[in-house]
Image (cartoon, rainbow, N blue to C red):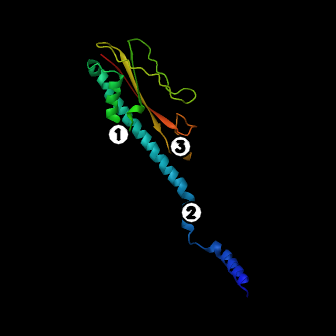
């Protein structure tokens, strides 16, 4: 028997025994399942991190807004930069200060409270915020809102929770924290 025919015979024998072989099947099965499993794990981690960051922003906003409620910020003559710095000091573990937006509005009694959505119809973030703390000894209602554009990474794997730039190369989730109170 010649060398090419022996090689052909071995190849045929190997192909006939291929369906009965079990060695390496676990590696092939893992290779098929691993990308989906890892994408799911990363999506869960990113969702958890976004939720945690939202809670940190909410707590920082409430603590900083309490300074307006107790009129400590007004007695110190705080402006928007001072208010934002105090908030940044509270949330600096997760947030960059230059990415935090602050909106403080004061409404006299019996005035309707109007809160606008900072995301326009095209999915863009609009910064038209003001800093209007309540005057001393007023019974105004104060609404404090803070925002942060959280960058997302897993959205490129098909899991999309973005509400800003969802179709762009840098999708983001707008984190918002709101607290309202009446100054007495």
Please name the residue that numbered disc 1 is placed on. Answer: 93
Q: Residues within 10 Å of mark 3 (few under 14, many from 20)?
A: many
**Where residue 52 sits: x, y (%)?**
40, 40
Q: Is residue 62 above or below residue 109?
A: below
Residue drawn 57% across the image and 64% down it: 28
Indicate the quadrant containing the N terminus: top left, top right, bottom left or bottom right: bottom right
**Where residue 22 sits: x, y (%)?**
58, 72
Please name the residue that numbered disc 3 is placed on. Answer: 155
Q: Residues within 10 Å of mark 2 (few under 14, many from 20)?
A: few
Q: Helix, strand, or loop for circle 2?
A: helix
| Frontmost residue, 17 versus 122 | 122
Q: Helix, strand, or loop for circle 3?
A: helix
Q: CA distance from mark 3 to mark 2?
A: 25 Å
Q: Are marks 2 and 1 in contact (CB under 8 Å)?
A: no
User: Of the residues under marks 2 and 1, which one precedes in the sequence?
Assistant: 2
**Where residue 146 sits: x, y (%)?**
41, 28
**Where residue 135 sits: x, y (%)?**
32, 14
User: Of the residues under marks 3 and 2, which one precedes in the sequence?
Assistant: 2
Please name the residue that numbered disc 2 is placed on. Answer: 29
Q: Is residue 38 above or below residue 82?
A: below
Q: Is residue 42 above or below residue 95?
A: below
Q: CA distance from mark 3 to mark 1?
A: 24 Å
Q: Is residue 62 visible?
A: no
Residue drawn 49% across the image and 22% down it: 116
Q: CA distance from mark 2 to mark 1?
A: 41 Å
Q: Helix, strand, or loop for circle 1?
A: loop
Q: Are marks 3 and 1 in contact (CB under 8 Å)?
A: no
The reply, left or right, for residue 110 in relation to residue 16 is left
Residue drawn 49% across the image and 41% down it: 152
Q: Is residue 71 above or below residue 61?
A: above
């Amino acid at each position: 028997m010649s060398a090419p025919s022996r090689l052909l015979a071995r190849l045929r024998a190997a192909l006939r025994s291929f369906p009965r072989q079990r060695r390496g099947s676990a590696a092939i099965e893992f290779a098929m399942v691993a990308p989906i499993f890892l994408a799911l794990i990363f999506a869960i981690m990113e969702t958890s991190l976004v939720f945690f960051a939202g809670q940190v922003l909410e707590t920082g906003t409430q603590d900083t807004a309490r300074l307006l409620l107790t009129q400590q910020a007004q007695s110190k003559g705080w402006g928007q930069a001072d208010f934002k710095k105090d908030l940044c000091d509270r949330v600096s573990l997760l947030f960059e200060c230059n990415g935090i937006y602050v909106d403080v509005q004061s409404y006299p009694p019996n005035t309707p409270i109007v809160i606008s959505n900072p995301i326009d119809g095209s999915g863009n973030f609009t910064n038209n915020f003001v800093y209007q703390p309540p005057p001393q000894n007023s019974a105004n209602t104060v609404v404090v809102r803070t925002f942060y554009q959280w960058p997302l990474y897993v959205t490129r794997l098909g899991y999309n929770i973005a509400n800003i730039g969802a179709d762009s190369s840098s999708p983001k989730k707008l984190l918002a924290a709101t607290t309202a109170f009446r100054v007495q």
